[in-house]
Image (cartoon, rainbow, N blue to C red):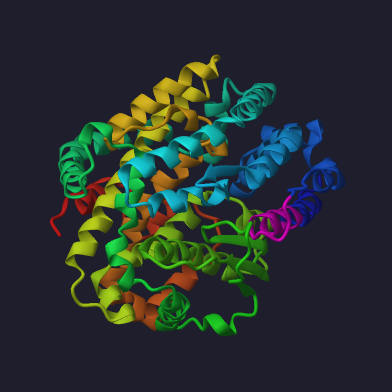
Amino acid sequence: MDLSKYAAEAEEFLSSLTAEWRWHDAGLKEALELSAIYRQHQSLFAPGAVAELLADRSTPERRSLAEFAAFGWIENELREITEEIATGESRATVEWEGKAIPWYQAGIVTANEPDCARRHHLEARTVATTAQLNPRRGERLRRAHDAGRKLGFRDYVEMCEQLGQLNLSALSPQMQKLLDETRTRHLKELAARLAAAAIPREEATTADWSFLHRGREFDPMFPKEKLLPALVQTMAGLGINLDGQSNLKLDVEERPLKSPRAFCAPVRVPHEVWLVIRPHGGHDDYGSILHEAGHAEHFAHAQADAPFAFRYLGDNSVTEAYAFLFGNLTRNGEWLRDILGLQDVGGYLALAQFNEMYMLRRYAAKLGYESELHRSGDLESQAPRYSRLLGEAVGVRVWPENFLFDVDDGLYCARYLRAWMLEVQLRKRLEREFGPRWFTSAEAGEYLRGLWSLGQKLTAEEIAARLGYEGLEMGGLIGELMKEI
């Protein structure tokens, strides 16, 4: 196989695919149309080409191309059902107070509903709509599992671990340690916040956490109109002129079908990277946009002449760590004072720590749940297990109807967990080198651009080693969750 020719076509394919997803998720088109793109590049996923790449994973470049080919072949097999599910989700509505609100927006409405009974009612309607596509989600997952076995792996988990270098043998016990050591602190904090909001502990659901997480009382600290200026000022402090980056394009237009959460679409790395935003204000919106800006700057600064595999592929734990680095600025008291001009931030920082604890415990539980889900021959039996495992981790009722919707391809929850650990290590290095206000240092920006230029040539473990650590370590992360605000 001519690897350079294969890589050139793979780049063209991913560029077209990412552009299609951008148009769909930006609300520019209702239907997601992937089939024509896969048909145009079907040679990438020919059985012979996939088998040849899987047979030789001796270098980082070949390993990344093998992962791309294998998961691309699987998605090619599933593209029609993927389109159907995505289009169904974009068209789905939830009946509420005589109106049909888009299913995509129901979560925002729920988080903003102050009345507990009404919040639960809307949540029930939303998960009922979610469940309507579960038969198709289940069929898609079964076919993905079958495809993994056809590629020669024992099961889907083995395929994800080997191709993605997820190191689950180390990660799984680390996550159990996190769950064990933070359980008492989390449940105590949760109980106090539920009581303060007059939410009966025994009736609390994920909708109530969304309401607590939303933190409406802090909205004046995070106004919609200051969001983009805060992003521009943050990047300027690092020596990055966001307005002058011709390769990084901002989409801030309001559209009915636009995803409520910001996202990054690296269409042509590093020449065309989109940061798609639907500003609505609030701390979560700020965190989301900063998170996606971390992705965008990473891709926009990738070395242009680096191999395709290092610009687009590799260990996504790395780009997620850069995204967490910026998203977590909303939990940084120095950033809140410098960029937003805030002074009294203790109450908000306590909420931010609580939210982070919840999310980490949720994802730690998801790792165990999804690992078993992908090995189960009876998917329906996993719905109550999902509700039980995640409910025990977060301390509120988790709806079993979400047991398939709440699953990303490729055991991606492991990427997030690895990124959480790497982000703490990277931030501690920046603070040691450039001070607690590292985000105001052009030298820190230069240091980050050096890392970003590598794309994803290195794994999370290799980045950690560059930062001076022996590997991905849990101690710093748990320490941050347990510290007193």
Quarter of the N terminus within the rendering: top right
- In the image, residue 56 sits, relative to residue 376, either above or below, namely below
Q: Position of residue 76 (x, y in %)?
A: 75, 37
- In the image, residue 356 sits, relative to residue 143, either above or below, namely below
Give the left or right position of residue 7, taking residue 383 as reference.
right
Q: Position of residue 63 (x, y in %)?
A: 62, 43
Residue that lies at the very extreme toward the right in this rendered image: 40
- At 28% from the left edge and 66% from the top edge, which residue is drawn? 218
Q: Is residue 71 visible?
A: yes
Q: Please tell me in which quadrant of the rendered image residue 47 appears.
A: top right
- In the image, residue 6 sits, relative to residue 162, either above or below, namely below
- At 58% from the left edge and 20% from the top edge, which residue is drawn? 154
Give the left or right position of residue 243, taking residue 194 as reference.
right
Asked whether 21 falls inside the magenta stretch, the response is: yes
Residue that lies at the very extreme toward the front in this rendered image: 98
Q: Position of residue 291 (x, y in %)?
A: 45, 62
Q: Is residue 52 visible?
A: no
* Chief SS of the magenta region: helix
Give the left or right position of residue 379, taking residue 87 as reference.
left
- What stretch of residues is rendered in magenta? 15-30
Q: Position of residue 136 (x, y in %)?
A: 65, 28
